[in-house]
Image: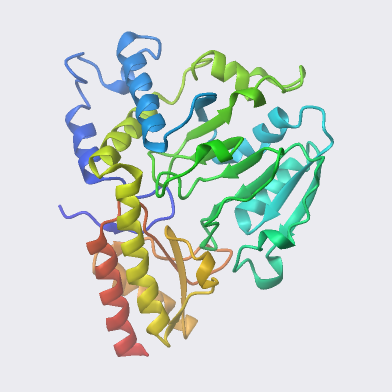
Amino acid sequence: MSRALNFSAGPAVLPEEVLRQAAAEMLDWHGSGMCVMEMSHRGPEFMAIAAEAEADLRELLDVPQGYQVLFLQGGATLQFSMVPINLLGGKPGADYVNTGEWSKKAIKEAQRFCRVNVAASSADANFSYVPEQAKWKLDPAAAYVHVCSNETIGGVELNWVPATGNVPLVVDMSSHMLSRPVDVARYGLIYAGAQKNIGPAGLAIVIVRDDLLGKAPASAPSMLDYKVHADAQSMSNTPPTYAVYIAGLVFKWLKRQGGVAGIEARNVAKAKLIYDFLDTSTFYANPVRKADRSRMNVPFTLADPKLDAAFLEGAKARGMVQLKGHRSVGGMRASIYNAMPLEGVQRLVDYMREFEAKRG
């Protein structure tokens, strides 16, 4: 059976090596006689899996001392609530930068807990760019500054680290974590849903600075308190064990690719391939300002939207799936995460060129 080229935004393509290893270990993990899904999360086998996954993630991102790495549930969406619950620390407000759909969702949820100052927004141009920091109106009394550094739906990526002074910088890295090097020390808290570059849906990763722990109010549910999870090494309750296991295999795969720096070079090449083609075409268009284009999520439109269905049908016939754009924006979207090979992007570009020649 030939595998499809899966351009889904998430749950997304995983490395074939990882899937084959997981299949081989399904019935018997390392002679234990058990599948990882069957193991006690407090047994020595899974404890070793979890510890190794954390160590590899720390190595890949060069996480400095003074930060906790948490494996949580609820995806990135639960973090929209956990961040204000844990970081407000009695302060009345927080700063948010609005660069698209996921920023808007984070803002809406934070408004349940505090006064949100939208320090900058690109809504004026349909979220097609990242506002320059010189235009941000930050509140020096804010509890934290929140940004989404890659908007999966709009294909906008923050390619620089904002300067927020003594105010902790919080970032949703869901759709590009592990795709490029990150200076973790410049952030107070980083979070990401796993279903893009890391593993199965349901797992969320949080990297949080020690001094930001212990600020949740006494009324907060214990499962929404980062300190509870940090103190229990992410095992305050039963964690998403199989998702952690798959993430650990992905971390090992990434190390074999030359780490984050190695995979970044491949991601740059893939993005260049498709954007160079888009920039020479009069049939396709990408709406994002060039400086802010995402390497991971590439939205594009056809000159005539009536051809969208035919384009998708032809792509599927050639083994390429999940290219339809998000329902909120339409068009097409190619998500070219770490596990998407350069050859897959080349096949897409070849098909786009062929379709343009026939229908353009």
Q: In screen coordinates, is 226 left or right of 38? A: right
* Quarter holding residue 211: top right
Q: Is residue 132 above or below residue 147?
A: below
Report whether 320 appears left or right of 151. Answer: left
Percent position of residue 44, x then y: 32, 9
Q: Is residue 146 above or below residue 319?
A: above
Number of callouts: 0
Q: How did the renderer colour the structure?
A: rainbow
View extreme (top): residue:
43
Q: Quadrant of residue 120?
A: bottom right
Q: Which residue is at the front of the view, 80 or 180?
A: 180
Query: For the point 43% across and 77% down, which residue is it?
Result: 308
Residue found 49% across the figure and 72% down from its top:
331
Position of 316 relative to 161 (above/below):
below
Residue 145 in sight from this viewpoint = yes
Point 30% across, 89% down: residue: 358
Front residue (pair 22, 122): 122
Tell me residue 28's x, y (percent): 19, 20
Q: Is residue 312 visible?
A: no
In this rendering, is residue 93 above or below 336? above
Name the residue rendered at 35%, 29% in the picture. Answer: 56
Residue furthest toward the front?
A: 165
Q: Position of residue 103 (x, y in %)?
A: 64, 52
Q: Give the quadrant of the C terminus.
A: bottom left
Q: Quadrant of residue 342?
A: bottom left
Where residue 302 appears, as percent x and y from the top left, is 45, 80
